[in-house]
Amino acid sequence: MRALMRELKHPERAFKSILIAGTNGKGSVSAYLDEGLRAASLRVGRYTSPHLIDIRERVTVSGRNIGPAAFERLVLEVRDASERLVEKRILPAHPNHFEILTAVAFLFFRENKVDIAVLEVGLGGRLDATNVASPLVSTIVSIDFDHEEFLGRTLTAIAREKAGVVRRGRKVVMGPMPRAAREAIVSIARARGATIVPSHKGVTLHDDAADGALDVRTPMGAYAGVRPLPGAHQRTNLVVAIRSLEALSEAGITLDLDRAVPAMSRAEWPGRLERLEGRPPFLLDGAHNPAGAKALAAYLREEGTPHVLVFGAMRDKHVDEMASELFPLARRVIATRVRMKRAATTAYLFEVGRKLGVSAFEEASISRAVARAARAARPGDGVTEGGDGHGLL
């Protein structure tokens, strides 16, 4: 990735940035920060993954997706640069899909002269393509089990990979996480002379209104009427985002926090506890690991509405653990699969349900699974579509 950046004349150096790492919550924190920074009259680039419908969702400037023509042109520019590097034997092979998209994002942000880019780490941190940037602030939202085949089998090992985003002499905002993960990150930060900002230390939250708005007080300020995205876990993510915004302010980004923080209430993050009203209403969530499934389960318990669950997942995920969180809460479970070789079969999901003492109906087609769920829903029921977020929703 560094060789590719040199060939492209270092687009990653053309703007300031913040790197967002972690197991879960990266996208939500990125969405909060995007809204807050734009409200402060900054020109903001945002790079996130994965996309839900259109690959261009991953790259935005001022809230707008990169256009089709610009996307095609920049992909070709990256391709040409890659071919030159391969021909010169500087690279042994062409960059992978994520590296190409990251380079496209950096080129687009340079072209559009963004003031700051909010960069969501794809996988891990230490070896991630986004890590060629030099962030003013790094944020590690959470640490839990996911992608162990790449990141390690313990929380300490996973945390060390995520801590690759830590920069010497700069601030690291750290969300709540298990002790082993926290200690690993603190150790690396100290070794690099970075300053740890524990996101929730000295922070108080007060429920402000029936619409879920919060009054938030941090060691740096007080902000009234800030509304998080749905789910109790989003209160945590919101605080991480606020503390990250404050850290950027201290790092030299000029912004009015009293204006920027309340604007986070406008954040949207589709496919994560996204409600589609109708008869029956649908709740879409792309939980793709045990921590995500626990957050969805907590939301469903709090809501208390009977529901039918449509569930699919990749077979290399912690399917049994996710199912154990979600299946027992549903009045009926309909197992389905996306059209990918990695997808768990409906027969496998049926067997997982049987072990849990839950009867799961099988529908190989997602459209038929959704239609069946809608028919099965009783008056007052909802339909929850949950599971690994690789195209299911």
Image (cartoon, rainbow, N blue to C red):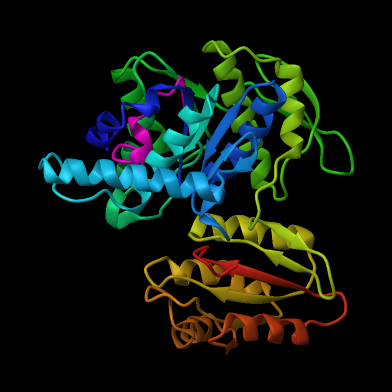
Q: Quadrant of residue 203?
A: top right
Which of these two is toward me, 208 or 255?
255
Q: Number of callouts in the render?
A: 0
Residue 162 makes an appearance in the image: no
Answer with left or right where residue 334 lies relative to residue 102: right
Answer with left or right where residue 115 lies relative to residue 184: right
- Asked if 210 appears above or below 357 in the picture, the reply is above
Q: Quadrant of residue 332?
A: bottom right
Image location of residue 344, percent across then percent down: 43, 78
The reply to whether the magenta stretch includes residue 336 is no
Q: Quadrant of the C terminus?
A: bottom right
Start and end of the magenta stretch? Answer: 124-139
Q: Residue furthest left?
A: 89
Residue 102 makes an appearance in the image: yes
Q: Quadrant of the N terminus?
A: top left
Image location of residue 272, percent across then percent down: 64, 55
Q: Quadrant of residue 248?
A: top right
Image location of residue 92, percent across then percent down: 13, 48
- Asked if 171 appears above or below 327 in the picture, the reply is above
- Asked if 127 appears above or below 151 in the picture, the reply is above
Image location of residue 87, percent across then percent down: 13, 45
- Asked if 120 appears above or below 296 in the picture, the reply is above
Q: What residue appears at the point 34 percent right and 14 percent down from the top-left corner?
A: 193
The reply to whether the magenta stretch includes residue 137 is yes
